[in-house]
Image (cartoon, rainbow, N blue to C red):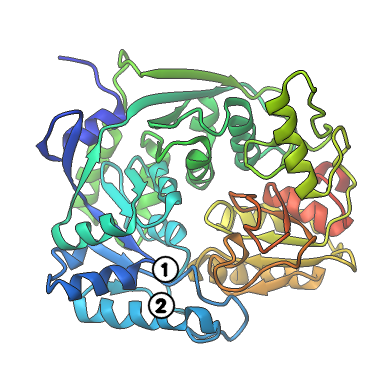
Amino acid sequence: MTAKTLFSKLWDTHVVQSFEDDWALLHIDRHLMHDLGGAPGLIELGRRALPVRNPELVYATPDHVVSSEAGRTGQSFPGGAALYAGLKARTKASGIRFFDLGQPGHGIVHVMAPELGIVQPGLTVVCGDSHTCTNGALGAMAFGIGSSELAHVLASQTLLQRRPRTMRVWLHGTAGANVTAKDIALFMVSTLGAGAAAGHAVEYAGPVVAAFGLEERMTLCNMSIEMGARIGMVAPDRKTVDYLAQTELAPRGVAFDQAAEAWMALRSDDDARFDKDVSLDVSGIGPMITWGTSPDQAMGIGECVPSGTLADADAYGAIDKACRYMGLAMGQRLHGTRIDRVFIGSCTNSRISDLRDAARLIRGRKVAPHVQAWVVAGSENVKRQAEREGLADVFRAAGFDWREPGCSMCVAANGEVGSPGERVVSTSNRNFVGRQGPGVRTHLASPATAVASALAGCVASAGDLA
């Protein structure tokens, strides 16, 4: 029998029909929808007089275009009011479960789906969002889809896809102090490059990944798309089983025991071959931060912005262009650079472990007077847990604005943007030009680095607070 990768096992068991050139019609086990694409997709089905094929396999939540201000409603951000109302009404009419604002289970789609047990090992999961790869941390084959694909899944519970190549990233070594999964993800993307995994499904493995908790694995898988991969995944293990045992929608009793046994068997065969196999030693790396306008333009906080050489015109031009937008000079030391805002949130770093890691560093300190700092929990469940643990009080006392769950400033589709020229330290996943508002300069970092920077009023690391 031919040895198989985890990805190959999941792909092969979901093929409804195969076609030439590695194309296949796949069965989709879970379909996640949010407010940007969900309502338009349902409207398209209505226009064509098509019913939702399996509404029980579809889950919807408003996250992208809803306000995160205290006391918000679906109409608080006028630009998103119609999308919110449309998703709510059309999911009800179609029999799709809708997690509304303020209700348990509501949140950023890639935070609430794993925490509720909607996503489970071995499933195919799709959503009209590129960071659907986050869900692969549970051993699922999860990927983002476009608007026409969204409608196709709603109508047929299938999707035509071309089989990607396989890639393994083996992470090993011992990182330095205060290094988190976000730092390792930024190190990986900056080392391998933004296109290193293009056309591949990536499996993360090795002792570093094995030591991660499930939420850290989600952070790592979330950044797969920033390396060019639509799919990132981690083989399920005992940690995965224990995590799912606490979720609302996982099987119960004997059914859970049977499922857990099957989940634990889902892994790449020992002699499976990957199309690309990469080994990265994380030994000695410290907290990371981006300096440019792409997630792969990252470095250790204590390092200097690259200088580039005129001998390599392309590289020099890219560095120069990024530095001009970011208001930095080649060779400049980023540590100590004044900032204006801090954003802790997004589907990358807004889970309870992220908020605990951030709050522990405050210790009675205050946000610098000139810095506006926000904390936006990833879900209603995370928000309530943080409030029960007193984390929200810690943030508020330090001068952070404690917001309602949602995507908020990550993509700024809800109008929550910075001002032109503002420098933001953000725990989100993308620092593209204008991502957090026209002219806004975004530095990606971990929650620990974000808190340290908010308190110092400049780019700083957790070590600076010792």
C-alpha gap between disc 2 and disc 1: 7 Å
Q: Residue at x 74, y 60 (%)?
A: 342
Viewer-side residue, 244 vs 272: 272
**Picture layout, residue 342 above or below residue 415:** above
Viewer-side residue, 268 vs 331: 331
Q: Which mark is residue 83?
A: 2
Whether residue 113 is visible to the viewer of this picture, yes or no, is yes
Q: Residue 203, percent across and down?
A: 41, 30
Quarter of the picture containing the C terminus is: top right
- Left or right, 48 with respect to 429, comes to left
Q: Residue at x 43, y 78 (%)?
A: 103
Q: Amino acid at mark 1?
A: Leu
- Mark 1: give few (<14), some (14-19) or many (20+) Cα within 10 Å: many
Q: Are marks 2 and 1 in contact (CB under 8 Å)?
A: yes
Residue farthest along the left direction in this orientation: 17
- Left or right, 151 with respect to 284, comes to left
Q: Residue 239, percent across and down?
A: 42, 41
Whether residue 466 is visible to the viewer of this picture, yes or no, is no
Q: Amino acid at mark 2?
A: Leu
Q: Earlier in the sequence, mark 2 or mark 1?
A: 1
Where is mark 1, residue-wise? 36
